[in-house]
Amino acid sequence: MTNKKRSHQAEVLIEGMAEKLNRQIVGSLVACVHCGNCTRSCHYVLTNPDDPTFAPAYKADRIRKIFKRHFDWTGRVFPWWVGAKSIFTVEELEELKDIVFGKCTNCRRCSINCPMGVDYATFNRMMRGLLVSVGIMPEGVAVVSKDQWEIGNQMGVLPEDYIDTIEWMSEEMQSELDDPTAVIPIDKMDADIVYTINPREVKYDPRTISDAGKIFHLAGENWTMPSEGWDMTNFGLFSGDDALGGAVAGRVYEKAKELRAKKIVISECGHGYRSTRCEGPNWAGMDVEIPMESSVITMLRYVREGRIKVDKTRNTKSYTFHDSCNNARSCGLFEEPRELLNLVVTDFREMYPNRSENYCCTGGGGAMSMSEYTPLRLKSAKIKADQLRETGAEVVVTSCHNCVDGLTDLIKHYKLGMEVTQLVNMESEVNKGSGFNVSIPRRSIALSSNDFK
Amino acid sequence: MPDSVKINQSTIRLIKGDLTALDVEAFVFYARPDLALGSGFGNAISMRGGSTIKEELEKIGGIKSGEAVATAAGELKAGYIIHAAGPAFHEENIEGKLLITMENALKCAEEKGIKQLAFPPMGAGFFAVPLPVCAKVMIESIKRYLSGDTGIKEVIICAADNRDYKSFAVELAAID
Ligand code: SF4
Ligand code: SF4
């Protein structure tokens, strides 16, 4: 028996663990047979082959030891026999922080390749949440979480700046389409679609808002954007804080309900899609009756139904597609973006492996906000860089804002010289010169082909 | 459910709104002992209020946990900000420490002659004070304070969303 005194934070963490242990997590904690399959799946291992501390099973064992010591009878009775070990000091908690935040992007590639069904990413997230609950987290996680809790979005965009940006994009749209009716409606009641976005679009990439607006307008959609509850991203997925997850998702659902919207459309964002559509109702403890879909599916439907017309011959570059882990692996959204992309480009080159086996952009799981791990992130990005290079494509398309940032960073680091874009930008570009909709006056979209890039 | 309750000559009022944009005499910012504004409401204070608030805080330097200090509110609509350093992240004796922080925030406002003061849900959210605990302690503390001899005429609780609002509405309705 050890005589080490346990810190208050460690006590709280162990108590919190008791509350988090559901069947899925316990199943994952007890099922590992140490076969090593997961090791071959993880981009951290593949780029650090000589360091066993990156292996998913090794990282998992650090959490498993605590579970065994406190919640598994074998570990309580024979701790030395089953490798059970408690946690005591703040230094040990800090060390655990560097594993669960710094050595894993929660990409779930190891999870889907485990023959025993061990979902390491899920209990890695659990441990993130437990550490956050006692205030032990990377600085960037704290900054972003506080913004999302208190301002309502994870980039601290103030309400007046959000409205200003939407109005600005609305004016841009009007002048670009030369159509006074081409506006972005805010808080319109009874719309068929309420369009929710990533705050990154407001802060760094407002063109994605007007691009989406053009598509909705040209498709003759009855749509709106909400004045609040507009951030469909959710840092709770990354930080493991289910309360934050529930509060953020709840704001989106409640605003859509207040507006009596018929559907929530989620702009291209992997973790936002997973959080809002899949995990949010559980976190928020709400029955969400309003249907939700990714804007990729919305855009694809418009093309299939002939509501927007596209001309793929206008896109002459070579393109590949990067699957966001949350879209593809966790939500099965991988055929629709390919179908859509193939409708707007002539030269599409698949990346291997792909779909649910694709490698993380290496900026997932909130990694882009944790600057202390940047050198390690970029080193582990080599696997992704090699994958991208082998396609020989000029442009990588993705359906995730986080992946745009992760890919842009690694493309710069590995000097790949590739462009990164999203489907919404592609769609909008193709529509500029070619599409028309019967409900839209022809002059409104008859732009010069010089506008097309 | 009532959105306001009278205690002697004063009122507790519950609203849903944007704390740092409120047109009130003063609002409370849930601070850290180092008085750094940081992100969240701190970011809104910096963006909307200008640099003088940070400069004033730097002169003060810091406070102890549980204490409160007032600064001017720069270009914000409010006249003052009460920076109160409450408990965080499941530290020991959350309820007791939150009660002390509330009392010190109210006293600090009183000393400045402030008659109207808005609070956020103190410590709930990022700082992980459980929302039901936060609502119970805050209402209890405000009720106790306003029952005594005070110049504060209105205490506003500013909920950020329906989730916050509902918890406080329940506690407000329970006031006899
Ligand atoms: S693949 Fe599954 S069973 Fe095998 S070592 Fe990894 S977690 Fe354990
Ligand atoms: S979830 Fe992804 S990053 Fe984390 S251990 Fe598994 S494969 Fe590696």
Image: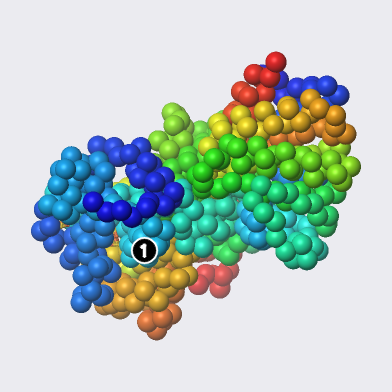
Q: Residue furthest top?
A: B176
Amino acid at the residue labelled 1? Glu
Q: Residue at x 30, y 53 (%)?
A: A3
Q: Residue furthest bottom?
A: A415
Which of the two residues, A77 or B123, is positioned nearer the viewer here? Answer: A77
Residue A117 is situated, as x and y percent measured from the top left of the image, at: 18, 48
The image quadrant where one finds ligand 1 is: bottom left
Nearer to us in this view, A242 or B145: B145
Task: Tell me: A50 left or right of B77.
Answer: left
Give the residue number, with chain letter if any, for mark 1.
Answer: A95
**In the rendered view, does A244 fall on the left or right side of B87?**
left
Q: Chain of mark 1?
A: A
Is residue A82 visible in the rendered image? The answer is yes
Quarter of the image where one finds residue B132 = top right
Counting from the top left corner in percent of width and height, residue A209 is at 57, 56
Q: How many marks?
A: 1
Q: Position of residue A102 (x, y in %)?
A: 37, 65
Mark 1 lies on a secondary structure that is helix
Residue at x-position 69% and y-position 31%: B141
In-front residue for pair B66/A128: B66
Tell me where residue B103 appears, x and y as whole percent: 72, 38
Seen at 28% across and 65% down, the residue is A359
Task: Confirm whether residue A182 shows in the render.
Answer: no
* Residue A50 or residue A74, whichever sits in front: A74
- Binning the other alpha carbons within 10 Å of mark 1 as few (below 14), some (14 to 19) or many (20 upward) gives few
- The structure's colour scheme is rainbow
| Point 12% across, 57% down: residue | A34
